[in-house]
Image: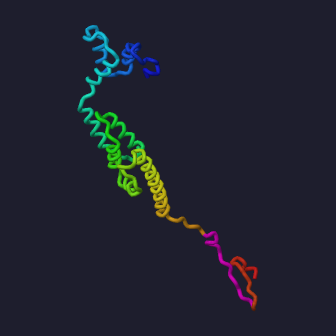
Amino acid sequence: MFEAKQYGGKDHDRECVLHLLSFLTGEAKKWYHRHMVNINHRQPDWTFEQVILGLYDRFIHPSTMQDMRKAFFATHYGEEKGIQGFYDSLVDHAQNMAIYPDDYLIIETFLKGLPTSLHEPMIKDGLSPEINTINNFVAEAKKHETTRKTLDYYNCMMTTRLSSPTPRVKNPQAGARRPIRHKVGVTLIKQTPGDKGNT
């Protein structure tokens, strides 16, 4: 945002400090007013860097980092978000951790968060955390996810078709009167019951 408005550099440091207020709410906004706007504030001039560090020290606690670490390891795959949503959640939590996890740990956590039906085929296909990247695992997991959804769809469709009763086709000839045949000499005469009076 500041870069887009060409506020970079020391010449625009004051403008950055002033514009920062529009991005703050709640307690953070009160903290800004207390230290930057209030007539009795102790430090007369704040640089943009000092404001950011001040906000960090005031509102980012060590316990918050620990919570992010716990959330990272507790993230699991869900059908609603899918593979991409699961991976995005992992990355979000990783970015909020005090120390960003290495690639191996991300892959390991990614595999642990998947159901067996998804992570087992990838291992059988030859993918390995020691060789492949997290992008390889995400791409392969998406393929297996699509395959599983397709199979589930057609299996459900076949089950529904087999469980539905087969409709009976009504014979259009049912209920019609059969013709009566009388043998006269060697000739067969076809006669319906309504024609008796005419013979």
Residue, far top: 39
Q: Quadrant of residue 104?
A: top left
189 with respect to 43 (left or right): right
Q: Quadrant of residue 45?
A: top left
Q: Residue 194 at what x, y percent from top left? A: 70, 76
Q: Residue 43 at what x, y percent from top left? A: 27, 11
In the image, residue 69 sits, relative to residue 39, either above or below, namely: below
Res 82 seen here: no
125 with respect to 187 (left or right): left
166 with respect to 142 (left or right): right
Q: Quadrant of the N terminus?
A: top left
Question: In this view of the protein, which residue sits in the foreground, 198 or 60?
Answer: 60
Which segment did they paint magenta?
A: 171-184
Q: Residue, x 26% and y 32% (percent of image)?
A: 64
Res 112 seen here: yes
Q: Quadrant of residue 99?
A: top left
